[in-house]
Image: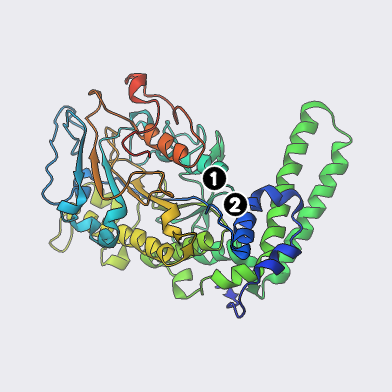
Amino acid sequence: MSTPRFFQASTALSRRRLLGNLTLGAGASLLAPFLSRLAAEDSGATAKPPRRVVFLVEGNGVSAEHLVPRGVVRPQSSFNSTAHNVTDAQTFREVTLAGHELPFCLEPLAPFRDRLAIVQGLSGRVCEGGHSVNFGALGQYGGQRGPAGETIDAALAKALPAPFPHVGLGITHNPNEVLVQNVSAWDAGRALPTMCQPDAAMYALFGSIADGAKDDFAANANVLDFLRGDLKRLSHHLAGPERAKLENYENSLAVMRARHDQITKRSDLLKRYAPQPGPSYTSLVETERLDAHVEIGAAALIAGLTNVLTIASGCGGRYFEVTFKGLGISIDKHQIGHGGGENGKSGDELAQTIRRFHIELMAKLAAKLQVVPEGNGTMLDNTAIIYLSDSANAHHATCWEWPTLILGDLGGRLKTKGRYLEYPRYGRTGHRTMGCLYATLLHAAGAPRGSFGQFDKALGKEFQQGPLGDLLM
């Protein structure tokens, strides 16, 4: 696929002109938060900035030891022979990051250490484990056979509406993959896509301003209108469940058409923030494609196209054997996960090199948001970036614990300022689960729930209900 060429913004956006020309129709509810913010900024009034959540999901497991600050000692357990570096912590503890240097993998986050929380000890045994738990990582259920329910990024997308409720970007072991379904789901049986080709993702998000592609983008609207007309005519000849199913399909097309209109009418805004595609957008090198995805994802957040972004790197049981040639590594992550090394470096050392690269991407995204003014601060002030793996703490995970990073406090709603948190080991008093962490994010996003995902039947419900009070403001 050739790289689309995009216009560079040449004039400043006139907010009053944009607001005055918009006639949203069915899409009004999606753009309402964004438009109210623009109107308030234009009039000098104070508006609440939108909240945003980003998930950076790395395949093949994250060793808890890679996230431990220097000088902090984790009590190790051998209570399960298949567990990898599982904590033996008997009680909850907190360590202030200000008194410790970050470990090798996390050094790129040094400029953001006062916004960072390292969370250890949460379990996700309900996900069953393996090379990847697929949709279970973000859904907290057994996801090996497909999405058994919504994932946390989808739940947040419903709570934080935008023209694109959710944007999924990422890479697999196959550079020719265009789109996969691997970690995100709107509901049971309704997987969300991960776009793997940066140039295709660029067109999907910013296609209305593509030089040479505007006619195609306009033609898509005509196709949607044609299909909706056919469906409406057909529905008159149906009754009962068949008609209801057809009407649901027609409603989906209506949402797509409304989003198309929103994007078209905001072309000035998109020109202002659209990145300029380069060779990395069509590169066969995985590090370059991931870097391009971070650039595109940041632009989508800054332009207000979405408030929920998931970047999945080699995630899902069929897609995890990525070789990071761009880092000078010639063996894939599957081999590394089984202890394979090369050029005098052990498998763990290679894994740390790859992990540090992903953390560099996390820092790069944070830096992009930090320089964009918003309200009384910047966009980063109203964002939370979550880093975790799709297979918990190891290549062959059993999900006894799930190392996680949280950068940003989501507009002051999370207590993430320079903290290392370690929860008691599985089954001990005070132990909590990843479902509790996801419930915490929903509380912070203004959509509280008592729990998230499915319950681990081997663990008491008291360990699995409610948000994490240690993280929630």
Q: Are marks 2 and 1 in contact (CB under 8 Å)?
A: yes
The kind of residue tagged 1 is: Ala
Q: Residues within 10 Å of mark 1 (few under 14, many from 20)?
A: many
The kind of residue tagged 2 is: Ala
Identify the residue shown where x is 48% and y is 42%: 445
Q: Which residue is mark 2?
A: 162
Outermost bottom residue: 10
What x and y, as percent, mark residue 405? Answer: 31, 48
**15 lies above or below 406:** below
How many callouts does the rendering have?
Answer: 2
Q: Residues within 10 Å of mark 2 (few under 14, many from 20)?
A: many
Along the viewing direction, whichever of 261 and 371 lies nearer the viewer:
371
Q: Judging from the image, what secondary structure is the residue with disc 1 in?
A: helix
Along the viewing direction, whichever of 223 and 38 lies nearer the viewer:
38
Identify the residue shown where x is 60% and y is 80%: 10
What x and y, as percent, mark residue 188? Answer: 55, 33
Q: Which residue is mark 1?
A: 157
In the picture, measured across the screen, residue 288 lies left or right of residue 193, that is: left
**382 lies above or below 130:** below
